Amino acid sequence: MPDNRAPTARCGRLWIDLSALARNYAAIAARVAPATAAAVVKADAYGLGSGPVASALWDAGCRRFFVAHLDEALAIRDELPPQAELIVLNGLPPGVEPLCARHEIVPVLNSLGQAERWAETARALDRRLPAVLQLDSGMSRLGLAPEDDVRLAHDDRFRQAVDLRLVMSHLASSGTPGSEANAMQIAAFDRLAAAFPGIPRSLANSGGAFLAAPYHKDVVRAGIALYGGSPSGDPADALEPVVRLDARVVQVRTVPEGTGVGYDLTHRCTRPTRIATIGVGYADGLPRTLGNRGAAWFDGRRLPILGRVSMDSITLDVSDLPAGQPAEGDWVEIIGPHQPVDVLARDAGTISYEILTSLGHRYDRHYLPFAGVNSGRPA
Ligand SMILES: *Cc1c(COP(=O)(O)O)cnc(C)c1O
C-alpha cells in the first residue's frame, strides 16, 4: 500500500482505508440487525474527514448520520443525497433553528428550552419539523430530566409541531460490558421511553453494539468501532484497522553514553545510542505523554521513544537496527499493523478516540477508495 518512493513535502502520511470502514459498517450492521446501524461522524468523522467518510458509509448502506454541532451537519449536507438523515447531537443554540430547518437537518432536543424553540420554529414555518428527543438515563450529561420527559410527552402543542423520529439516551459505561451502570441505564431508559409509545429508540454507541441484543433497540449509533478503535480500549476488541500513519526520519546520528536527549534531557543514554529523529510531534496529535514510553516501528522492530515529545519531532532509539537503517527520508510506522491505534493510545495514557480526533492537519492524506455496494463504480 505505501509507496516509499512517492515524494512528499509533508512530515507524515496518513492512509484512510474507506473499504475497511465500509466492512466495519457492514459488520456492525450485521451484528445489531434487526436494529439499524447509524454512523457518528462528529469531529470530522473522528479526525478522518467527514466528507469522504460519510460518502463511503452512504455507499455501504448507511442512511443516518450523527454529528455534534449544526455546522458539522452543514459541512456534509451536500456530500450526501437529500434522503440522508443528519442529526445534531448537541442540539441547537438559540437562534439557529431556522438555518437547521432550512437545510432539513434534525436536531436532538436535550432540554425543554431546545424543545420549545424547535416547536416555535415549526409553528412559525407552519410545518411539522423532525426531531430526536434525548432522555437522561443516568449519565447526567445531556437529555431531559424524568419530570420534563413526562411533561413533553403529554404536551399536545409540542407533539403537533414536532415529528419525533427517535427517542435516545447514551450509555456511560458501554465499554465495560460487566458494569452495573449499563443495566441501570437500560432500565431507566425503558421506563422513560415508555412515555413515547411507537417512537423508535436508540441507546447504544459502539460499546453498546457489543452488548446483548436488548441494548440495540431500533438504532445503534456507531462511532469509534467504524474507525477501527476499540470501544473497551483492548486492541483485541477492535474491528478492522482503518488508519495507517507513517512519519519520516529527518536525521539519524549516534551519541555517546551519558548523553541527554530532548527537552530537559529526561533520557540519559546508558550506552552509545543511535538516534533517529522523526518529523512529527505533539502539533501532529502525538501526545506529550508518549515521551519515554511510546514507540514507532520500522521493518518489524519496535523503536522506543527517547526523551520528550517535541512540537515537531520525536527521538527514537534505533541502536538495535542494522547499520544504515533507517536512513534519512525513510518512513516509520506510528499507527499500523505493528502498532494499532489502541496500543499507541494506551502508551499515551489515553483512548483511541483522543488519538484519532487529534490527528493534525500536516499529514499527506490518502483515501483508499471504497467501490461501494450500490455505486457501481470500478474498484
Ligand atoms: C460520540 C457519541 C456516540 C458514538 O460513540 P462511540 O463510542 O464512538 O461509538 C454515540 N452517541 C452519542 C450521544 C455520542 O455522543
Image: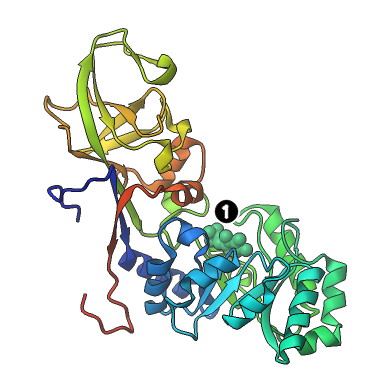
Q: Position of residue 365 (x, y in %)?
A: 30, 55
Above or below for 10 versus 253: below
Mark 1 CB lies closer than 8 A to ligand 1: yes
Secondary structure at badge 1 equals loop
Residue 262: give x, y in percent of width and height: 37, 20
Q: Which residue is mark 1?
A: 175
In the rendering, at what x and y percent does residue 54 appear? 43, 71
Do we see residue 165 in this rendering? no
Quadrant showing the C terminus: bottom left
Q: Amino acid at mark 1?
A: Gly
Exactly how many numbered labels are in the figure?
Answer: 1
On screen, residue 196 versus residue 246, left or right, reads right
- The image quarter containing residue 49 is bottom left
Q: Is residue 221 above or below residue 260?
A: below
Q: Residue drawn 39% across and 22% down?
A: 307
> In which quadrant of the rendered view does residue 276 lie?
top left
Q: Quadrant of the N terminus?
A: bottom left
Quadrant location, ligand no. 1: bottom right
348 relative to 126 in the view: left or right? left
Q: Badge 1 local density, few (<14 within 10 Å), some, or many (20+)?
A: many
Point out the residue furthest to the bottom here: 126
Q: Which is nearer the eye, 366 or 226?
A: 366
31 above or below 294? below
Quarter of the view holding residue 70: bottom right
Foreground of the two, 78 or 337: 78
Q: Is residue 7 left or right of residue 276?
A: left
